[in-house]
């Protein structure tokens, strides 16, 4: 009787141990499964978000600066995603960023050169203020005699009456479009007759004696 009771107790203990071991193993498997599912979900989320961000960069619709775009691509690369589409999109995004930076630098340089050109133009304009005033004064003369006297005085600055006068009528892409060339003598008498000066001295050339040998004007 006692022996049977002992055997029963042992059997019960063994059964409980088996249940506990089996339950623990099942619980461990469940936790691993949940961990795998969680990792898979996180991976899928990263792939989806990465594709979304890369698409915005490639299409030029992202709100980020080029530096921020570059940081975003580097962040995506750090995920080490093995999705073929993401890998290809990373290449395209990097090319897009490189092209954007190059274009931005080109525009900055273009703007810098324009600013320098404008500064030079203003500096040159201030150099030629006096001759502009003289030419305007001829056109504003109240009488023909007064205009002729001013023409004679102005002619002293030029190497000869036949000094060429070039008149720019338009500028585009760094090129000038000129009106029909004339001489300083004809131009000064033209100002006298028209009684208006709608020009500005753009540049001039002088000889070793300081006399003007060429005058370039721009029509305003």
Image (cartoon, rainbow, N blue to C red):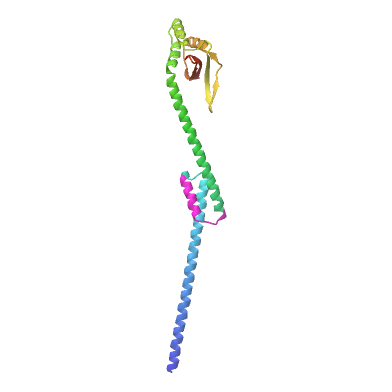
163 up-or-down from 4: above or below = above
Q: Residue at x 53, y 50 (%)?
A: 90
Q: Position of residue 116 (x, y in %)?
A: 46, 29
Hey, which quadrant is residue 20 in on the image? bottom left
Closer to the camera in the image, 147 or 115: 115
194 up-or-down from 21: above or below = above
If the image is split into quadrants, where does the N terminus sit?
bottom left
Q: Which residues are magenta?
A: 67-84
Q: Position of residue 80 (x, y in %)?
A: 51, 56
Q: Residue at x 53, y 17 (%)?
A: 166
Predominant secondary structure in magenta? helix
In the displayed image of the protein, which residue is found farthest to the bottom?
1
Closer to the camera in the image, 179 or 120: 120
Residue 49 seen in the figure: no
Residue 78 seen in the figure: yes
Inspect the magenta stretch and tell me whether residue 32 lies in it: no
Q: Position of residue 17 (x, y in %)?
A: 45, 81
Q: Position of residue 4 (x, y in %)?
A: 45, 92
Q: Residue at x 45, y 89 (%)?
A: 7
Closer to the camera in the image, 206 or 19: 206
26 up-or-down from 136: above or below = below
Closer to the camera in the image, 130 or 75: 130
Inspect the magenta stretch and tell me whether residue 68 lies in it: yes
Would you say 200 lies left or right of 85 here? Answer: left
In the displayed image of the protein, which residue is found farthest to the front?
208
């Amino acid at each position: 009787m006692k022996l049977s009771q002992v055997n029963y107790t042992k059997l019960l203990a063994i059964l409980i141990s088996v249940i506990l071991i089996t339950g623990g193993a099942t619980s461990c498997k469940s936790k691993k499964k949940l961990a795998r599912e969680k990792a898979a979900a996180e991976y899928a989320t990263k792939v989806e978000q990465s594709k979304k961000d890369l698409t915005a960069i490639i299409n030029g619709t992202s709100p980020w600066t080029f530096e921020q775009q570059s940081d975003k691509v580097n962040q995506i690369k750090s995920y080490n995603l093995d999705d073929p589409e993401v890998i290809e999109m990373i290449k395209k995004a990097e090319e897009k960023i490189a092209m954007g930076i190059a274009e931005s630098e080109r525009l900055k340089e273009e703007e810098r050169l324009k600013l320098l050109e404008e500064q030079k133009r203003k500096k040159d304009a201030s150099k030629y203020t006096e001759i502009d005033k003289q030419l305007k004064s001829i056109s504003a003369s109240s009488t023909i005699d007064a205009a002729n006297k001013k023409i004679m005085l102005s002619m002293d600055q030029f190497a000869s009456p036949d000094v060429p006068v070039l008149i720019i009528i338009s500028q585009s892409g760094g090129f000038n479009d000129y009106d029909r060339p004339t001489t300083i003598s004809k131009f000064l008498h033209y100002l006298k007759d028209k009684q208006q000066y709608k020009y500005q001295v753009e540049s001039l050339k002088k000889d070793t004696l300081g006399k003007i040998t060429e005058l370039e004007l721009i029509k305003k």
